[in-house]
Amino acid sequence: MGEEATDWILESLEALAFANRLSLLSQLQDACTLDEIELTPVDHDGRNGNRTRCLTRQGVRYHLNQLQEAGIVRAQRVREGGRVKNAYRIDQAPLWALAEALRELSAHGNPSVHPEDPDPSPIEWEPEPTGPGPHLVVVHGLEVGRRFRLGTLEADRRRGWILGSQPKADVPLPESRFVDDQAAEIEIQDDTYTLLDLRSARARVSLNGDRLGLGERRGLSHGDVIGVGHTQLLFRE
């Protein structure tokens, strides 16, 4: 695990190391405005400090700001009663990435655990059908069961399908701290699909648990598992 990833883990844990913030996150599963949040102060030992009063708006806003800076909470503008306000909601992606990073960190001390190896027997998911043709299925990640269809490339398209953390990627992945904007590319030629490790990426991708070299290209077969960051995608033809 690199120094940048370690620093991010420490920053995230520091942001979460407050009982009041953990209590606040439990309320932000759905978007809430500041007026809708009622946070009872919690002592360091985890007990409610004063059940008869709630934390002030200023106190709630402070904790929200800290969680926003850590990327754990995001705000969106909503109209309520003729006024535009901020609504706050937990961002699941960084919390999932943090959990995976901690799992990987703990596994380094256990030689029987191999965090980078894909599950040898991925669960056969049956989400909503997307039609015939090759596709990728998330078998380990934030959106397990999600499918990404790989069809035929348009005549004016010069590249294949890009896997990366940028929102406009053909296969967008949520781990911005562990996945490059453009991490890998799936190419097609004569109905044959190949996985290409992009040279511009800082982190390598893997195929069936075997890490690809810089700029390496390998053929894809039905049942192969592509690893990008902590996400694993099953290739189906």
Image (cartoon, rainbow, N blue to C red):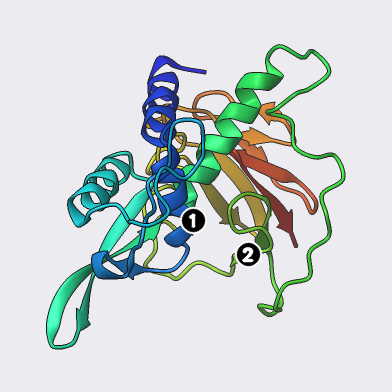
Circle 2: element type: loop
Is residue 65 shown above or below 150? above
Depth order, front residue of 237/61: 61
Question: Which residue is depicted at the point 71% across and 77% down?
Answer: 132
- Say which amino acid is labelled 2: Arg
- The 10 Å Cα crowd at callout 1, few under 14, some 14 to 19, many 20 or more, is few
Query: Residue 219's x, y, as percent?
Result: 69, 43
What label does residue 26 carry, if any?
1
For the residue labelled by badge 1, is the local secondary structure a helix, a strand or a loop?
helix
Q: In the picture provided, is 199 more to the left or to the right than 79?
A: right
> In the rendered view, does 127 fall on the left or right side of 17?
right
At a point 23% along the width and 46% down the height, the residue shown is 65
- Number of residues whose C-alpha sits closer than 10 Å to that of mark 2, classed few (under 14), some (14–19) or many (20 or more): some
For the residues labelled 1 and 2, the Cα–Cα distance comes to 25 Å
Compared across the picture, whether 95 is left or right of 99 comes to: left
Snapshot quadrant of residue 75? bottom left
Q: Where, quadrant-wise, is the C terminus in this rendering? A: bottom right
In percent of the image, x 61 and y 21: which residue is there? 105
- Marker disc for residue 146: 2
